[in-house]
Image (cartoon, rainbow, N blue to C red):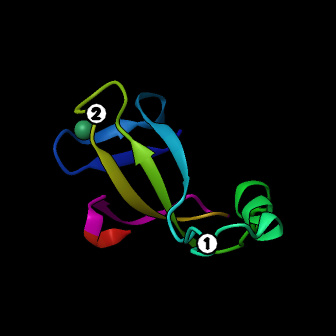
Protein backbone atom coordinates (compact mmCIF):
# COMPACT_ATOMS: atom_id res chain seq x y z
CA UNK A 1 0.00 0.00 0.00
CA UNK A 2 1.25 3.44 -0.91
CA UNK A 3 1.12 6.14 1.78
CA UNK A 4 0.87 9.65 0.37
CA UNK A 5 1.79 12.46 2.80
CA UNK A 6 -0.94 15.03 2.17
CA UNK A 7 0.29 18.51 3.24
CA UNK A 8 -3.06 19.12 5.02
CA UNK A 9 -4.15 15.70 6.30
CA UNK A 10 -0.86 13.89 6.90
CA UNK A 11 0.05 10.42 5.60
CA UNK A 12 -2.97 8.68 4.05
CA UNK A 13 -3.57 5.51 2.07
CA UNK A 14 -3.53 5.84 -1.70
CA UNK A 15 -7.13 4.53 -1.59
CA UNK A 16 -8.16 8.07 -0.54
CA UNK A 17 -6.51 9.60 -3.61
CA UNK A 18 -7.17 9.58 -7.34
CA UNK A 19 -4.36 9.69 -9.85
CA UNK A 20 -4.58 12.74 -12.10
CA UNK A 21 -1.91 12.05 -14.67
CA UNK A 22 1.50 13.28 -15.72
CA UNK A 23 2.33 16.68 -14.19
CA UNK A 24 5.02 17.41 -16.78
CA UNK A 25 2.78 17.49 -19.87
CA UNK A 26 2.45 20.79 -21.70
CA UNK A 27 -0.61 21.44 -23.85
CA UNK A 28 0.33 22.20 -27.48
CA UNK A 29 -0.17 25.89 -28.26
CA UNK A 30 -0.81 25.76 -32.00
CA UNK A 31 -4.37 25.23 -33.16
CA UNK A 32 -5.29 22.99 -36.07
CA UNK A 33 -2.43 20.54 -35.66
CA UNK A 34 -4.45 17.36 -35.28
CA UNK A 35 -1.39 15.11 -34.95
CA UNK A 36 0.04 17.17 -32.07
CA UNK A 37 -3.35 17.23 -30.35
CA UNK A 38 -3.79 13.46 -30.74
CA UNK A 39 -0.28 12.80 -29.44
CA UNK A 40 -0.97 15.03 -26.44
CA UNK A 41 -4.20 13.21 -25.63
CA UNK A 42 -3.28 9.59 -26.33
CA UNK A 43 0.49 9.09 -26.17
CA UNK A 44 2.18 8.76 -22.80
CA UNK A 45 5.71 7.96 -21.77
CA UNK A 46 6.20 5.13 -19.31
CA UNK A 47 9.18 6.49 -17.37
CA UNK A 48 11.34 4.39 -15.11
CA UNK A 49 12.49 6.46 -12.16
CA UNK A 50 11.30 9.70 -10.58
CA UNK A 51 8.14 11.15 -12.05
CA UNK A 52 5.93 14.18 -11.32
CA UNK A 53 2.26 13.25 -11.09
CA UNK A 54 -1.02 14.95 -10.25
CA UNK A 55 -3.03 13.38 -7.44
CA UNK A 56 -6.21 14.63 -5.78
CA UNK A 57 -7.09 13.79 -2.17
CA UNK A 58 -10.60 12.78 -3.19
CA UNK A 59 -11.71 11.41 0.22
CA UNK A 60 -9.85 13.96 2.32
CA UNK A 61 -9.20 17.66 1.80
CA UNK A 62 -10.04 17.39 -1.95
CA UNK A 63 -6.90 19.35 -2.88
CA UNK A 64 -4.84 18.71 -5.98
CA UNK A 65 -1.16 18.09 -5.41
CA UNK A 66 1.98 17.24 -7.31
CA UNK A 67 3.65 14.08 -6.08
CA UNK A 68 7.20 13.18 -7.12
CA UNK A 69 7.13 9.38 -7.04
CA UNK A 70 9.59 6.70 -8.11
CA UNK A 71 7.78 4.48 -10.61
CA UNK A 72 9.70 1.34 -9.61
CA UNK A 73 9.97 1.60 -5.82
CA UNK A 74 6.89 3.85 -5.33
CA UNK A 75 8.96 5.90 -2.87
CA UNK A 76 7.72 9.48 -2.62
CA UNK A 77 10.32 12.27 -2.75
CA UNK A 78 8.03 15.29 -2.36
CA UNK A 79 4.42 16.45 -2.28
CA UNK A 80 3.35 20.00 -3.01
CA UNK A 81 0.07 21.71 -3.74
CA UNK A 82 -0.73 22.08 -7.42
CA UNK A 83 -1.11 25.74 -8.28
CA UNK A 84 -1.01 27.79 -11.44
CA UNK A 85 2.71 28.32 -10.76
CA UNK A 86 3.36 24.54 -11.03
CA UNK A 87 1.67 24.25 -14.40
ZN1 LIG B 1 -5.62 15.96 2.23
Label 1: few (<14), some (14–19) or many (≥20) C-alpha neighbours in 10 Å: few
Q: Quadrant of the C terminus?
A: bottom left
Ligand 1 closer than 8 Å to label 2 CB: yes
| Of residues 28 and 64, the one drawn nearer to the viewer in this rendering | 28
| Of residues 71 and 20, the one drawn nearer to the viewer in this rendering | 20
Q: From the viewer's perspective, is 45 left or right of 13?
A: right
SS type, badge 1: loop
Q: Find the distance from the CA under tag 1 to the CA under tag 2.
A: 28 Å
Q: From the viewer's perspective, is 39 left or right of 9?
A: right
Task: Tell me where the magenta segment starts and ends, as one range.
Answer: 72-84
Marks 2 and 1: in contact by CB < 8 Å? no
Q: Residue sitting at 76 percent across and 70 percent down?
A: 33
Residue at the extreme right = 35
From this view, report whether residue 29 is shown above or below residue 37. below
| Of residues 6 and 52, the one drawn nearer to the viewer in this rendering | 52
Q: From the viewer's perspective, is 5 left or right of 47?
A: left
Q: Position of residue 64 (x, y in %)?
A: 33, 47
Q: Position of residue 35 (x, y in %)?
A: 83, 67
Instruction: Identify the residue under disc 2.
Output: 62
Q: Is residue 63 magenta?
A: no
Q: Residue sitting at 72 percent across and 67 percent down?
A: 32
Residue at the extreme left = 8
Label 2: few (<14), some (14–19) or many (≥20) C-alpha neighbours in 10 Å: few
Answer with mark 1 or mark 2, whichever residue precedes in sequence: 1
Regarding ligand 1, which quadrant of the image does it lie in?
top left
Instruction: Identify the residue under disc 1.
Output: 28
Q: Position of residue 9 (x, y in %)?
A: 19, 38
Q: Is residue 82 magenta?
A: yes
Q: Residue sitting at 20 percent across and 51 percent down?
A: 7
Q: Quadrant of residue 34?
A: bottom right
Residue at the extreme top = 59
Ligand 1 closer than 8 Å to label 1 CB: no
Amino acid sequence: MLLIPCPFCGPRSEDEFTFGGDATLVTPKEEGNIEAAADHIFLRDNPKGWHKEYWVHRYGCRRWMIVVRHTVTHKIKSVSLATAINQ
